[in-house]
Image (cartoon, helix red, strand yellow):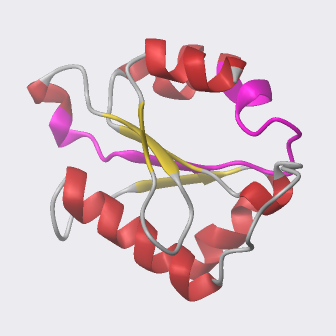
Amino acid sequence: WFGSVTLWAAGFRRCKPVGGPSYWYRQSFDARLDMRSPLLFFHGIAPGGYVMYLPMILWGLGNDGRAIFLFENDSISCCPVFTADTEDETVRVVIDAVNRHIGNNVDVTLCGHSFGSCPITWLI
């Protein structure tokens, strides 16, 4: 709950697509920053999801004002009830999210911590 409220207050909005991981999205602060590739971040094993990553996201990775996507993985967030997303579902949701919010055929910056490197290999 704390992580969700903090991300919302920082301008992120949560999106829940059908059949795949949920994600948080924050658009870039300035149209001139749209030239920077959006950052796609995938967390590692983390009780509470993004709570432990908030300082790094808000004052580190997200400090330059570019658009950011934070993809959730409930199966490694210690959620009591979850459905594990497949590789195909994850890749489809990531591509659809970028196309929806940013546009087709754009370069992105991929960043993952620990287990978060697995979805990056699926995307590559």
Question: Residue at left 30%, top 59%?
Answer: 98
Give, as a single range, the part of the protein colored magenta.
34-54
Front position in the image: 40 or 74: 74
Front position in the image: 123 or 49: 49
Place of residue 25 in the rendered image (x, y in percent of width and height, measured from the top left): 39, 39
Q: Is residue 120 visible?
A: yes
Residue 114 as seen in the image, left or right of residue 56: right
Question: Residue at left 80%, top 51%?
Answer: 44
Question: Residue at left 34%, top 45%?
Answer: 38
Q: Is residue 7 above or below residue 100?
A: above
The answer to if 76 sits in the magenta stretch is no
Q: Is residue 66 above or below residue 76?
A: above
Q: Is residue 123 visible?
A: no
Q: Is residue 86 above or below residue 38?
A: below
Q: Is residue 93 above or below residue 103?
A: below
Residue 78 as seen in the image, left or right of residue 16: right
Place of residue 76 in the rendered image (x, y in percent of width and height, measured from the top left): 84, 57
Q: Residue furthest left?
A: 31
Place of residue 21 in the rendered image (x, y in percent of width and height, measured from the top left): 57, 63
Front position in the image: 109 or 95: 95
